[in-house]
Image (spheres, rainbow, N blue to C red):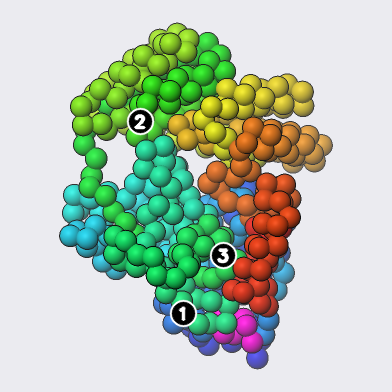
Amino acid sequence: MTIAAAVAAVVGDGAVITDPDVADAYRHDQTPMLDAGRPAVVCFASSTQEVAAVMRIASETRTPVVTRGAGSGLAGGANAVDGCIVLVTTRMDRVLEVDPLNQLARVQPGVLNAAVKAAAAQHGLSYPPDPASYAFSTIGGNIATNAGGLCCVKYGVTGDYVLGLEAVLADGRVLRTGRSTVKGVAGYDLTSLLVGSEGTLAVITEATLRLRPAPGRTSTMVAVFPTLVAAGRAVVEISRAGVVPSLLELMDHTTIVAVDDWQHMDLDRDAAALLLAQSDSADGGGTAAIAAACSQAGADFAVETDDPDEGEMLLAARRFAYPALERLGATLLDDVCVPRSRIPELVEGVEDIARSHAVTVGTFGHAGDGNLHPTFVYERGSEAAEQVVLRAFDDVVRLALSLGGTVSGEHGIGLLKRGHLADELGPVSVDVHRAVKAAFDPLGILNPGKSIP
């Protein structure tokens, strides 16, 4: 019996794809320039039991398994390898429970981030993790990459909201980690180990998520700067002032113009950079202090609004950043993160790298937590342009490490950053990572070639 036939016997004929042309859409995520193999079968699991059965087949036949959610990743973490099973979890898309008293939710991995937010809101609660892809990315993918987003500066990343997990191990056994209590220190923290593991240790089939009371009314501020470095200095001043915005986002000139060309939002096209901030502080004074810090750092002007529609419009401009840059050509998006105090050096260094390689870069991102996304725009189909961009991309990653930063703030390692991971971890940490991988997946069948150097 073929692998495809064995898997079909578990999930049903209607839940498998073997046609190479149809399966092609499931071979890779949204990252360009990365290798993707041809799977033996793409299957859509509908339950933990089906996932466990598929993993038993994979273990018995030593067949690689690449788990996939919505495919919205930006590091090649869900790219197929030749002959693998692509295990898609999007049919496991239910919010199983919302518990208002204990402020938690139990969800399946295929449920969209936006659906969890909506379910929480029905009970006056919120699920804060807010990746730009929240409308179409799945919770399973968010957990696999420890996704961040716009609100991380105040509310943290996905891992801060994962209390417990159900996951299927490589041999098909079902593992349950974590708890539903406020506190708990029994055993190793396997939940945190699985968060961010990019499908290399287990297949997540259920998550218990922490919820919070819904935030109050927000105020919004936008500040315009004559240079990108001045905007970076403003982030430092805001931090020094002890103000904690609920979001603090940066857009450079290239990104501003790209968004305005597409959406006609009447943005300041002459600005070298802008900072967008929101505050949901109880006293309502958060944005005034942020505006003062921006003026201190050299902003041309800063304006505030309590109008929720105006705030949403400005927030939409930031969310349009990456798709707007994609309209200009092929793109390669970086995901470096540095201490907030080093942001001015990072943005200045990115500008220097762009000039030295003569490439177009649009820089935007989560300035409040030091996580920026320099995005390289280049000619589609040009191998020469790709090589230049890859060299510039590597220079940005090395710059971030030299500033005490990390190679990936929220998108994960996948294939894209695998070559840089050892530079950050060091040899002892690499050895420990490999030992953990071997303990969870001794046959090496879970997402091989990803993340672990």
Mark identifier at residue 82: none
147 lies left or right of 401: left
**Circle 3 SS class:** loop
Mark identifier at residue 245: 2
Q: Residue placed farthest to the bottom in the image?
A: 1
Q: Residue at x 25, y 31 (%)?
A: 281
What is the magenta range?
55-60
Mark 2 or mark 1, which has the lower sequence index?
1
Question: What amino acid does circle 1 point to?
Answer: Val
Mark 2 or mark 3, which has the lower sequence index?
3
Secondary structure mostly seen in magenta is: helix
Classify mark 3: residues with Cα within 10 Å, few (<14), some (14-19) or many (20+).
many
Residue at image mark 1:
174
Question: What amino acid does circle 2 point to?
Answer: Pro
Determine if the magenta segment contains residue 402.
Answer: no
x and y percent of residue 345 in the render?
Answer: 62, 24
x and y percent of residue 218 in the render?
Answer: 26, 31
Contact, CB < 8 Å: mark 2 with mark 1? no
Question: What amino acid does circle 3 point to?
Answer: Gly
x and y percent of residue 363 in the render?
Answer: 57, 29
Contact, CB < 8 Å: mark 2 with mark 3? no
The answer to whether one can see residue 55 in this image is yes
Q: Residue at x 67, y 38 (%)?
A: 401
Residue at image mark 3:
199
Q: Alpha carbon of mark 2 to alpha carbon of mark 1: how far? A: 40 Å
Could you say which is closer to the camera, residue 426 or residue 111? 426
Determine if the magenta segment contains residue 56.
Answer: yes
Q: Alpha carbon of mark 1 to alpha carbon of mark 3: how far? A: 15 Å
